[in-house]
Amino acid sequence: MSKSSPVTIVEVGPRDGFQSIGPFIPTATKIALIGRLHDAGLRRMEITSFVSPSALPQLADAEDVVSAAATLHDLDSQVLVPTLRHAERALAAGARHLSAVLSVSERHNIGNVRRTPLESAADYAAIIAAASPDIRIRLNLATSFDCPHVGCIGEEAVLGLLEILLAATTDVEVALCDTTGRADPRHVRSLFASAQARFPEVSAWAFHGHDTFGLGAANALAAWDAGVRVFDAAIAGLGGCPFAPGATGNVATEDLVWMFSRMGADTGIELDRLLAVARNVADLPGAQVGGRVRQAMEARACLAVAQ
Amino acid sequence: MSKSSPVTIVEVGPRDGFQSIGPFIPTATKIALIGRLHDAGLRRMEITSFVSPSALPQLADAEDVVSAAATLHDLDSQVLVPTLRHAERALAAGARHLSAVLSVSERHNIGNVRRTPLESAADYAAIIAAASPDIRIRLNLATSFDCPHVGCIGEEAVLGLLEILLAATTDVEVALCDTTGRADPRHVRSLFASAQARFPEVSAWAFHGHDTFGLGAANALAAWDAGVRVFDAAIAGLGGCPFAPGATGNVATEDLVWMFSRMGADTGIELDRLLAVARNVADLPGAQVGGRVRQAMEARACLAVAQ
């Protein structure tokens, strides 16, 4: 990614994508795929998560993945850490960029980590205190727009929680996450505008979107319109639910690269190389994939002749 | 559709969708599906096309479809007519709303109707002259953004052709069509802004988009931002190429209804009824379908529990 690149894509497939895949992906395969994503031009990735290996066996090799990714030139590798305990494990393993996460929705947060958002906020403050100043921090606010349990999330709930969280530090990149894919462009624009107006001291804002209802690209466009320049995406649109084919997951990296490139906003990513990786990822046993560009490019010999 | 509805969706599945399906759909099935789309709230549809039956046997029953659709209450049925000769057939069959089409790209237009865009423009003027003043006119400009043969289309080519076409009448709805699905939101906003500024006398503007590269919804959002309030879409995302699975076609009606409804822009369409039709359309032999909302709703029992 050149320093002047106007859009930064954070590849979250190795974390948000792989965690949705049942059959264990050999560690060497994960490391090879991360290397090829790096070759395609990606310079930020969420490479794994430090969580309980019994709860998420797919990511039990987090230490090995962190070590391997550290050898890739100029790669900013972030790791997801849901609690202080796991953040300490990540730091001990050599992680330099922590991606903290909590959910605005109380019910969703309790379902994920058995604590309230305020309890998670206290834990987040402890993570900030435990990390040395050179450790970069990404703060993910899950269910910032909509919760699978309670539906639409009001803006004030997000802003009120952010107020508490930003007391720990404002030297942080804040990602507002559309966990369910049910956010719409108007909501995305509105919440980012409100958040940026209320917290101008935040270092950077990011959008994490899902394509479940076909609005992955439209919502990213809405966030772009609001001034956001950092976008999470997963190669091949990984991240669907293995029990519900068609309930696709993260917006596909290749779809966002396509959109932003067509718009003249360079991502620093080579689409052809990225698509080669996407095809291999789509072939992983148990992978639920999405996105459009991969299939369209495979079918590009078919030229439209009608209107 | 209530008169105050801020978004009008033109269902083009019975034309742009059905024409992409190889096996003949029985006329009674077509008429039944049009009736159910009407039941779901659609009040504008492109129900068929008058073309050479030998070139497009799927639409050889255009007269029967026009007669049947005329019995549906308050339905504005438009029929696609590529030439004066076919427009005369449509009018003789009782069509009240003609959807003329020509392509900005010379190569594309020659491929479709064996004449240059200027020759088609003269034919269009003859259609206007042949139609009585109470016949409504939609003018579709195919390849307004991108051509499968020559790539990106410059704005001046579109505006220059429009200048000629609007000499026939300005009492027309002009649709700028993203034939290939390769338009991007910046281009969509820019072209609509330029066209509206240059031709403020045009009655209405519409956007016809495809989802081939995943930008169906994002480009519709861009057109909406530019003030467009009429959008073509096809039930179940029909309109792909039967020889290239995955090269999806028109943006799915249900996806646009979802997006605009979530944004608070009423379409007058009941999503549940629409989805029931979409499921049946997806089951038509030979149908190439797309869209996200249909599959997401089928899988809605799967609730996201991770970020």
Image (cartoon, coloured by chain):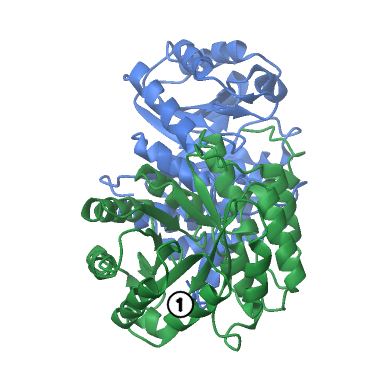
Chain colours: A blue, B green
- Left or right of residue B183: residue B277: right
Amino acid type at circle 1 is Pro
Residue nearest the viewer, comparing A104 with B66: B66
Evaluate whether residue A210 shows in this view: no
Relative image position of residue A270 (x, y in whole percent)? 40, 60
> Is residue B232 visible in the rendered structure shown here?
yes
Task: Name the residue located 37 percent from the left edge and 46 percent from the top edge.
Answer: A74
Left or right: residue B187 versus residue A220 is left
- Circle 1 sits on which residue? B82
Q: Residue A108's spot in the image, x, y percent?
A: 67, 23
Whole-percent x, y for residue B144 in the image: 35, 66
**Image quadrant in which you'd find residue B110:** bottom left
Q: Secondary structure at mark 1?
A: loop
In the rendered view, tell whether residue A92 sits above or below residue B288: above
In the shown orientation, is residue B130 left or right of residue B257? left
Residue at 25%, 51% in the rendered image = B200
- Depicted B149 relative to depicted B31: above or below: below
- Which of B304/B4 is in front? B4
Image height of A108 relative to B306, above or below: above
User: Viewer-proximal residue, B213 or B17?
Assistant: B17
Question: Which residue corresponds to the image point at 65% horizontal and 68% vertical from the top-left?
Answer: B67
Measuring from the top left, give residue B18's x and y in whole percent: 64, 70
Task: Locate residue B152: give its quadrant.
Answer: bottom left
- Residue in front for this viewpoint, B292 or A118: B292
Classify residue B95 by image quadrant: bottom right
Specify whether A121 is left or right of B174.
right
